[in-house]
Amino acid sequence: MVPETVKKLIRPAYFYTLSKQSDIAHSSPEPSEQEGGVDNILLISIDALRPDYTPDLDLTWASAVAPSTWTFPSVTSYLTGRYPHQHGATAHTHSSDDSFAMPEQASPTETLPGVFERRGYDTLGLFAFPMPFMASRGWFQKHRVWADEPAETLVSKYKSWSHGREKTFAYIHLGDLHAPITPPKEYIEKQNVDTDLSNLEIIHEYTNSYDGSEKCRNYREQRLKLYQAALNYVEDTLQELLRNQDENTLVLIYGDHGEAHWEHYEKDQLFTDSRPNYGVGHGGTPFDMVSRVPVGVSYPELRPKGGRASLIDLPKTVTDHVFGSSPDEFSGCSWGKGSIPSERSVICEGVRYGPERKAVYRQNRKLIRSEADDVTLTAELTTTGEDFNSEFEYVELLNQLPDDWGRGESAKTGRIVEDQLEALGYR
């Protein structure tokens, strides 16, 4: 076994090498003569961004349903315009023992960065930690992945890369809100976080014993303060970046999924969770704080209107706006072309831990279903989340869920990648 001190020394070089290997493995698509009406496209994903914590940034904000409750399938979906059950190899996977589970990477015929590269744009993918990189490696001309890096590093890298380039498409995946949450000290102090509480940054407390007691509620309060401190740091980092973008840059900022903080810990115990983490974190049951995320756009006309929006809409929305059309492979709705149909149903698919759970949204109603546990929950959606006390006829909603409840094959990863992902809470 390699000592941790040695791993720490070689980790930066290892992840730099992974980045370069992905650059070399990248296969450029056939060029197209179709020109775009926007010179620069910047997509920023803030990992684990809750729907009730909209960033304080000068964008037009709405919300959308994430395709999945965790990073790998969600990233794949909003870069390909397809739901997780349509990815083939990236269908859900989980560990039934102590082994590490990593889905096989999808092999789509079309990706969002590929469309822009074909039309003469330089493309870049920046990843604060390995999981989103594993989902999309090789899809960009240039990649850079770190073990666990703060927002400032990624923003600085983007600025240096984009300087002097005429047409760019960049994807930045920030990990500052993902456990372990370690914002700069001054942000923690501003939020008056009780740092004496143990394991606050990684949620080791109350993952299986949260009972609503005063002690538990205090832990939750302090955890959310720490979460807010990290978001404030991200906001300050992105404010400066956004101020320097011209009107010919399309910016979209959103979460890849949300993050639960025990909102429905009792309901969650109806489902099997192999960790177990009931009502907390992500990767499990698609409660609203996990399955819905804020979406900010720099062009107000692209704000989703009408019915329910999904992050699978991003590829179609972006390409329709920039080029006037989108590839057939991109499903979903185009946010810039009228209102989303009010009767539209969108889904969020879990899970990484335990049997698969799926959610479907339509208007102000929602259904969560687990076939393996034979559990169905229905809820009315409110301004603060879900009301599971409501009852209604749900057969029509249930029929909107895909029949595929299987899981994909696990891919092999290097020991250093596995070690780092386990440090981030993955197993």
Image (tube, rainbow, N blue to C red):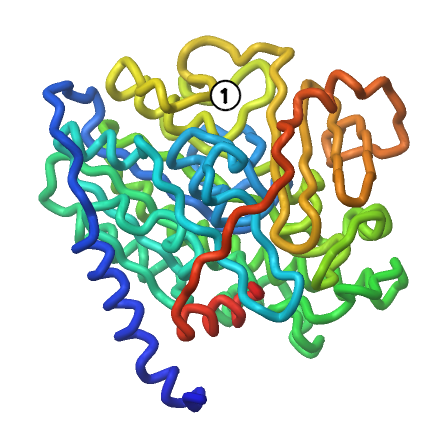
Residue drawn at 26 percent across, 75 percent down: 13
Return the x and y of residue 34 as percentages of the image width and height: 15, 19
Task: Note whether residue 232 is visible.
Answer: no
- Disc 1 marks which amino acid? Pro
Q: Is residue 219 above or below residue 355?
A: below
Left or right? Give the position of 418 relative to 272. Answer: left
Depth check, front residue: 134 or 361: 134
Residue drawn at 27 percent across, 13 percent down: 324
Q: How many marks?
A: 1
Left or right? Give the position of 125 relative to 338. Answer: left
Return the x and y of residue 352 as percentages of the image width and height: 61, 52
Task: Note whether residue 380 is visible.
Answer: yes
Return the x and y of residue 277 as percentages of the image width and height: 73, 60
Which residue is identified by label 1?
304
Crowding near pointer 1: few (<14 within 10 Å), some, many (20+)? many
Where is the C terminus found, in terms of image quarters?
A: bottom right
Where is the N terminus found, in terms of image quarters?
A: bottom left
Residue drawn at 35 percent across, 47 percent down: 136
Q: Is residue 302 above or below residue 17?
A: above
Return the x and y of residue 288 as percentages of the image width and height: 69, 38
Quarter-wise, where is residue 120 in the image?
Answer: top left
User: In the structure shown, which secondary structural element does the residue marked by tag 1 occupy?
Assistant: loop
Residue drawn at 46 percent across, 69 percent down: 418
Quarter-wise, where is residue 170 in the image?
Answer: top left
